[in-house]
Amino acid sequence: MVSMSKIATGNGHGENSPYFEGWKAYETNPFHPIDRPDGVIQMGLAENQLCFEFIKKWLMEHPEASVCTSEGVGRFKETALFQDYHGMPEFRQAVAKFMGKVRGDRVKFDPERIVMSGGATGAHETVAFCLADPGEALLLPTPYYPGFDRDLRWRTGVELVPVICESCNNFQITRNALEAAYEKAGEDGLRVKGLLITNPSNPLGTIMDRDTLKSIVRFVNEKNIHLIGDEIYAATVFKSPEFVSISEVIEEVECDRDLIHIVYSLSKDMGFPGFRVGIIYSYNDAVMNCARKMSSYGLVSSQTQHLIATMLNDHDFVDDFIVESREQLFKRHEYFTWSLSQVGIGSLKGNGGLFIWMDLRKLLKDNTFEGEMDLWRVIINEVKLNVSPGSSFHCHEPGWFRVCFANMDDNTMEVALSRIRAFILKNNESIVPRKLCRRSSLKLSLSRSLSRRIDDFMSPTGIMSPHSPLPQSPLVRART
Amino acid sequence: MGLLSRKVTCNSHGQDSSYFLGWLEYEKNPYDEVKNPRGIIQMGLAENQLSFDLLESWLDKNPDVAGFKRDGQSIFKELALFQDYHGFPAFKKALLDFMAEIRGNKVTFDPNRIVLTAGATSANETLMFCLAEQGDAFLLPTPYYPGFDRDLRWRTGVEIVPIKCTSSNRFKITASALEDAYQRAQRKNLRVKGVLVTNPSNPLGTTMTREELDLLVNFITDKEIHLISDEIYSGTVFSSPAFVSIMEVLKDQNLEKTEIWERVHIVYSLSKDLGLPGFRVGAIYSNDPIVVAAATKMSSFGLVSSQTQYLLSAILSDKKFTKEYIAKNHKRLRKRRSMLVAGLEKAGIDCLESNAGLFCWVDMRHLLSSDTFEAEMELWKRIVYDVKLNISPGSSCHCTEPGWFRVCFANMSEDTLKLAMQRLKSFVGSITGHDRSHQELKNSRRKFRSKWVFRLSFQSFHDREQDER
């Protein structure tokens, strides 16, 4: 019998990893406040759902953004026929301008360099196809987004070599770690073609500082390898320090621009994963031209190009959106991390992304990845929260979990927090040692006073009480 | 350079072919009735522009869909977040119902067997990744769509071996042509994984006969290989014989649920039938659950935008509309084809009898200075630069005989088509109407050849300077 390809029958799609197992658990029993109040709450999905009302308002005021309304139908035919892989000029201009604004207008992006792709998923695969041949390798700092195992390797045949980052320095990338990974690749007979960094980081929720970025740029130039900067979370940086893009750093450090490529998307910053708007921005002409031809395999629907062009060319809307989004993310993040700290759960100090990197090392029975899996199963099956175990992100140390906070409404967040609280308090004697939380000065106890105090702040209606100890976002302060 | 992959530096993207060079020339000097009446008329683009009024009128009557609403409620958020690679269930159902309707409801499709992709371009590449390894081969009847050279081969490393079809039997696939192709592949040490056919055919504009389809089923049974049927033009069959889908043939041969059944895969798209190439709506339909599973995961690299899925699920669920659309679209295509054929006849040019597609397969062998592909290129250059019509030379479609050209008829207004035919008639009159001496003809050919050789140098699509001509 004729076979299919190894690609089709193998496991290169990576979907047998626990990252996806948790999704399946959620899908068989998803939480719903009325229909399934005991269902699993999805906290493994890095979606940005906090600004839809804001966007919907704009849509209602701009019917011409759709080519199907009477205001927009005059462009229906032209749009429906438009399949030029250069993309609509107004779309490219709008995206280039948006990318600049998200970086505080400290850099300008050239619309002629904007290349479309089928989401960032398509962008990553295309960039891998352009930069590496089968059997060659890319370096990736750990922990990293599990989808990279599929996107960069599956059909391309490219290998991934981890750059090990550790909690002792908050998982920052060090020169030593880069060199070690590069050497290890060499020892394994792999030719390294590039380094891919995600900044802001998924799953850490942190940004790279300027010095680290400069060091990385110097490293790739010395080794003459490519640097791919996945900046998909650029607009989700909700408090200082400010986001610094590779596009800025290459203006400050000597750099061969042919090595520099940025991957972007509107899935996280705007919350539009369904619209499949991926962008490759390469400073290398040959890569740009090749990626553009490859974009035929995943062009952005012209209907969507038109919508996005209309929306993002409204600069007032964009300015307001960026501020609003940051504010919503800030509020949600601060409330979530504070609530966790009240029950002694810490997380890596972050200022971007749609998730926190939660530290549950003290809850492990064994300081092993088996221990992490055991704890994870308890969280899914008993606490009924789908969170993502650090091992699925190739984290080097067990006990870390990525927990998303921007993909649910306030009520669901409250339910999730109450479940966490209940779980911690219930297991206090057997699992949690006395002094758990380093950040909070509260001693963890089962005292009623503690429970009542938490209840004071967890009102079902608002995110926080007016007497909340949480600091206000500097963005809010600036406006009032 | 060594710093980039081989895919960047090789030519497998196929964009140095004449098929794309013609497009380039057109874009530098495009015809416009008012602004550029002497420009090049685009007849190399297989688009269906004849029925937009029907879609626009539907939109006018369905404002909810336009405003991201369902039953008066905004569903914008739901759409913006929907990235499930299984696709919008309502859309898959509507699409499959549409496909069944096109096949006279003689076949039914299972929604668990369809995979949505960003256009047929993505569907074809994805099937290659699923069915073949680097260095394997697929057999394709010639002439075939030039884009396959890129879509099937570029990033997959799969080879194409042509099944040579000739004008002697109107380019039909024969058992000997199939066998010959298979043997040629074997001699090149290529493992044949399957056959890919386009039915209705691009560039021929014909539907496959039942005999051809039976032949294919026998062949893939005998060789134990796959069959991909690209049915992207299935909704453009405007006159008899009626379209017969490969699925129908398998059913008639009682091969449902057999191993052979699982080796047959269909590719579809709304780019041609509904004239919506910009919306990137493609699909793979396979009877093999492993292919469906793998292709579904691969579709992550090119999903259909959720807002597009939503719009089209609404349009295609309106059965009254789809029935009316199919009928009117056929009528308009039929009329347009007749206009082209009549115009060609006036110029003393024949074309292959056809009943589908958005183009005719035109026979200009009698206008060649010699029975060679060089002569075909010469003639083509004259038609592009002097007659100012961009048509596609048969060699770009891998035709084995020089002198055939694909000429599109559905991507322009009636007036433009008439003008194109007038230009062609004048041109043919000028080269055949006078008694030119043999030496004169040779001289004029030599003069043209040197000009064309310069232009024939293969530059990439993007390297051309704007004002070079």
Image (cartoon, coloured by chain):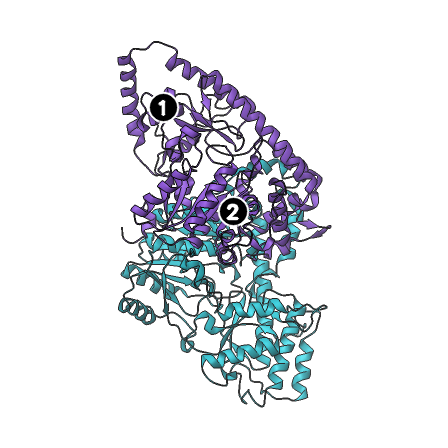
Chain colours: A cyan, B purple
Q: Which mark is residue B8?
A: none
Amino acid bearing label 2: Ile
Residue A190 rendering spot, x and y as whole percentages:
29, 64
For this rendering, which residue is in front, A49 or B175?
B175
Marks 2 and 1, how far apart at CA: 36 Å
Residue bearing the label numbered 1: B379
For this rendering, which residue is in front, B431 or B265?
B265
Q: Is residue B125 above or below residue A81?
A: below
Q: Is residue B47 visible?
A: yes
N-terminal of the two: label 2 or label 1? Answer: 2
At a point 41% along the width and 49% down the height, the residue shown is: B223
Residue bearing the label numbered 2: B266
Is residue B311 shown left or right of residue B272?
A: right
Is residue B326 shown left or right of residue B253?
A: right
Is residue A240 shown left or right of residue A412?
A: left
Q: Chain of mark 1?
A: B
Amino acid bearing label 1: Leu
